[in-house]
Amino acid sequence: MSKKLIALLMAAMMLLSVAAACGNDEPAETPTQPNANTPTTPAPTTPAPTEPAVTEKVYKTYLASEVASLNFIDNVDSNAATPAGYAMSQLWKMYPNEDGTNYIWMDDLAVGDPIQVDDYNWQIKLREGATWQNGDPINADTWMFTFQQRLNPKMMPRMASFLYSNVVDIVNGENYLMQGTEGYPATVAWEDVGLKKVDDYTIQITTTDTGYTPTDIKKHFDGRDNTPVHQGMWESCLSADGLTTSYGSDLEHFVGCGPYTFDSWEYDSIQVYTKNPDHWNADKYNFDKIEVRIVPEMNARVELFEKGEIFSLSPDANTIESYIDDPRMTTYGSLSVYHIDINCMNPTNPLSGSVNYRKAIYHSIDRVMAADSIFGHMFPVGTYVNDQAGMLSESALTYRESEYGKAVTDMVESWGPAGYNPEMALDYLNKALAECNVTDDQLPIKVKYCIDEGELSWKALGEYMMEQWPVIFEGKMELEIIPYAGMSATDFKKTGDDKWDLSPNDWSRSMSRTYPHTCFLYYTSTYSGRPNNYLNADFDAQYQYCEDIKLGDYDTLLKETQKLEEIYLDTVIHVPVCQALNYELFVDEIVLPVKTYIPGFGWGAIFGDIAE
């Protein structure tokens, strides 16, 4: 995206504000009745006051899919952030500043800033008196138990890397998790990990590098996975062999500690949260109740939005034209690059492991058409590093606008519009067929394109590819759409490598706003929850090199990120389609705490209010 377009979008955002309208549809309470002992003598002419009607403030929102689990240290799906934000507390949380132009850090389970002991050690003071919603205390022991479970080498929680290597790297964190596996020590004692209890309300972390700030430490512990685990509940949910847990599988196997209590959970229907008046930050939250509906279908969301049953709407390609001129519409950038993961281990696909096959798919997608006509007002890209990567760096220079990011974009455009080139696609397919010794009687190659049946835009792209591939590939390769429902893409892939070849996705990495290369974390071999099964040693090595220099010169980091993106494109780690732009409307009765969308914070809707 050009710098000019970004500037226009940002200017538009700054002019937008959400209007607050008065009134509500809920009946007022019956006015207070006169005192039964009122004397028979006429009362003074001043009328007796009546108590004002009390209206419950209910925030109504939605999720496109149900949350698989409340085990936040293992659930890799981004929608888990919703219950984590409402029902859980963290060490610190982001909070809107006074004039609504940015965010500040609010103490939550921690008190005050991290204290630097020396170049490598930081202490965190904990809130005394903080409790779980069942009354159990939250203290240093809680956090030490949580940290040990997050790095549990038996379970290998899929969010573990966000503890040992997020903003900072924790001494021996990765070694403890991976102990006994190839390339790691045979055993590592917990006492050697850089996570320690100092006293009942102080914990200490030890980093592998220097040069961090208190804000870096806060950012490291931000996110849905950085919430505590209730020890008693965890142990009661643990399997006999210690390999699995039912923790968070339902409300009977979960204990919260957040500003809201997770009251009821009708799976695939609605989640209901009520305000926790005993929470230490209760005065920061204005809603009495939050209702989260699970609404996979866009048409159903539109209907609910128009009826006032949900308070915001993010239109898709099929509905955006109806709202594009609505004065409530807001537009802002995104960390997401819509892309397609490719299975390189399908035993039923003779081309599965071929890079030439992957390049054939890469060049076969008309991204300009897809971004505009299928995804609706998105931006076509054949690159992967997102538009916001680097925007929160010290220089505020994004990778895409740097000379290094532009060089990669220019390379992609030299192949064709956003990398689309049917002739190159066919040439690479023919190379893949020859490389894999595919005979004519094995043609056409059937490629399984697996999608959640509620993802209409991805379905439309699949249908388009079904029409185009027989032409582009001269009948040698065809697409077959395999729909599924009731599970995440990650869970569907677990059903077997023979079940899929292509899987749409849109993983994003907030840390890339500061360190651009980190958007690639999910595709490295060390990330246990990775959505792909294609591993590349050069890619891993270059990612680690970027990690090693991320606290050094930013220009050097941008240059090395260019090399990382070039490896990504040369080996086709996965196939990018378009840079996601967000379009969102809020109903008039919602008062948001910020004046515009704030990257890294959002709208702060949890701190919003209902207009009087």
Image (tube, grey):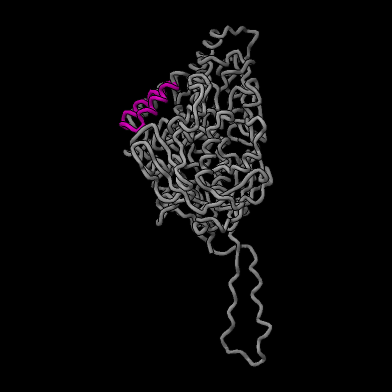
The relative height of residue 198 versus residue 307 in the rendered view (above or below) is: above
User: Viewer-proximal residue, 362 or 183?
Assistant: 183
Is 88 on the left-hand or right-hand side of 203? right
In percent of width and height, residue 561 lies at 38, 27
Q: Residue at x 55, y 51 (%)?
A: 131
In percent of width and height, residue 167 lies at 42, 36
Q: Residue at x 38, y 24 (%)?
A: 545
Instruction: Specify start and end residues of the magenta stretch as a single range.
Output: 539-567
Look at the image and tell me in which quarter the C terminus lies. bottom right
The relative height of residue 599 versus residue 538 in the rendered view (above or below) is: below
- Residue 306 visible: no
- Residue 541 visible: yes
Look at the image and tell me in which quarter the N terminus lies. top left
Q: Is residue 550 part of the magenta span, yes or no?
A: yes
Q: Is residue 345 part of the magenta span, yes or no?
A: no
Is 140 on the left-hand or right-hand side of 545? right
Is 563 on the left-hand or right-hand side of 498? left
Q: How many marks?
A: 0
In percent of width and height, residue 506 lies at 53, 33
The relative height of residue 85 versus residue 27 in the rendered view (above or below) is: above
In percent of width and height, residue 440 lies at 62, 7
Predominant secondary structure, magenta span: helix
